[in-house]
Image (cartoon, grey):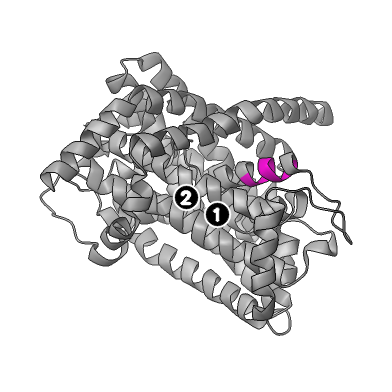
Amino acid sequence: MQEQLQQILLSISEFVWGPPLLILLVGTGIYLTFLLRGLQFRKLWYSLWLALIKRKDDGDNPGDISHFQALMTALAATVGTGNIAGVATAIAVGGPGALFWMWITGLFGMATKYAEAVLAVKFRVQDENGEMSGGPMYYISRGLGLKWLGVIFALFASIAAFGIGNMVQSNSVADAVQHSFGVPVEITGIVLAIATGFVILGGIKSIGRVTEVLVPIMIVFYMLAAMVVVFIHINHVPNVIATVLREAFTSTAASGGFAGATIMMTIRMGVARGVFSNESGLGSAPIAAAAARTKHPVTQALISMTQTFIDTIVVCSFTGFAILVSGVMESGQTGVPLTSTAFETALPGNWGGMVVSAGIILFAYSTILGWCYYGEKSFEFLLGAKAIKPYRLLFVIAVFVGAVAKLDLVWTFADIMNGLMAVPNLIGLLGLSGVVAAETKNYFNNKL
């Protein structure tokens, strides 16, 4: 019975995440790029300066957390196991050229992330607890006047948070800790549930305080380890770059444990894993952007779009290059084992596997924190602020369940929910693209 249900869910997932949705996701990014005259390229350094160097904001502006905390909360939810396992899977199945298509998805996805944040701040509201609430459910209902579509998004998002943002992540942590350190999954589940509850029960301000410290540390830690791998194999870098660019547009021949890939498979794996990694177009990140203290929507939007740059162009690239320069792609492995093998070629003893395991633990835990906020705000839209505390309690329980349970069905169901979130969000983005353009023009004309 379970196998039959899994097959049904897999068929639904393949349909939802088929070429039409992937084309719509990337196409929306391309359309917004032209509408905004390549803003993500023209203003990249300015946005990175705002996000990572200036960092200060005016405490008198409406909002609950700083620009930087909002960015780190969104990055916490986005930089997850997909940056380790997803990139490896894309390369193992789609070949080296898949990395190029992840870059393309990320570059156009920056425009999508920018538009999401503009609308999230523009149409946010203050809830009965005095906190800011925003995101696709609000800009769809208040901007487009389609409350029923906002309800559909909120329903999918509040459910998806339990899958991709919770049980899938706690399961990854429990597996990593068990394989690397021999700790029973039940113990990991209890510790992780307590650690999650300790943070999320304090709401977005508590989450923001934790993520602004945790996220930079975990990203720098992982990148330094990946840089060591690349540096050890530095003589292979020019050839790897040439291979990535060449095989993005040609079929990849079978070699060793690699089965080969057609051009369409390369593009599909790169685009799909890129979208899974940076979440541009899914509508999750703007929920965090709406909580930022800011006087103009564009200020936070410029900061928010750096999230996709950091996630895909920086972190995913380091994983991809570590795998390709180390020559382990032909091992026949995929996912986490492939990334671990790559790191083990450069780091002594079993340090490679331990670094990857530590990365999974930190990335997955931070994802749980970020997605809890996304889920509770979506649930609040459906049932009001009174529903937040019960949602948090269920979320903590689900962390433990995810750590100890078999999750084949949950993985597939989570994929479906994520895809279904994207549809109403993309309708909102396209329908309100004129508002995004007007707000952008107002900001830069008046130098706000």
Residue type, label 1: Gly
Residue 417 position in % (x across, y down): 57, 31
- Left or right of 173? Residue 42 is left
Q: Is residue 371 in view from this perspective?
A: no
The dot on residue 59 is none
Residue 60 position in % (x across, y down): 10, 50
Using the image as rendered, state which of residue 390 and residue 48 is in the foreground.
48
Residue 393 position in % (x across, y down): 46, 41
Q: Which residues are magenta?
A: 265-270
The residue at the point 78 percent across, 43 percent down is 262
Quarter of the rendering occupied by the N terminus: top right
Image quarter of residue 284: top left
Q: Main secondary structure of the magenta part?
A: helix
Mark 2, residue position: 77
Using the image as rendered, state which of residue 44 and residue 77 is in the foreground.
44
Using the image as rendered, state which of residue 302 and residue 422 is in the foreground.
302
Mark 1, residue position: 80
Q: Is residue 408 in view from this perspective?
A: yes
90 magenta-colored: no
Q: Is residue 375 above or below residue 322?
A: above
Determine whether label 1 and label 2 are within 8 Å by CB: yes
Disc 1 and disc 2: Cα gap in Å? Answer: 7 Å
- Left or right of 284? Residue 124 is left
Residue type, label 2: Ala
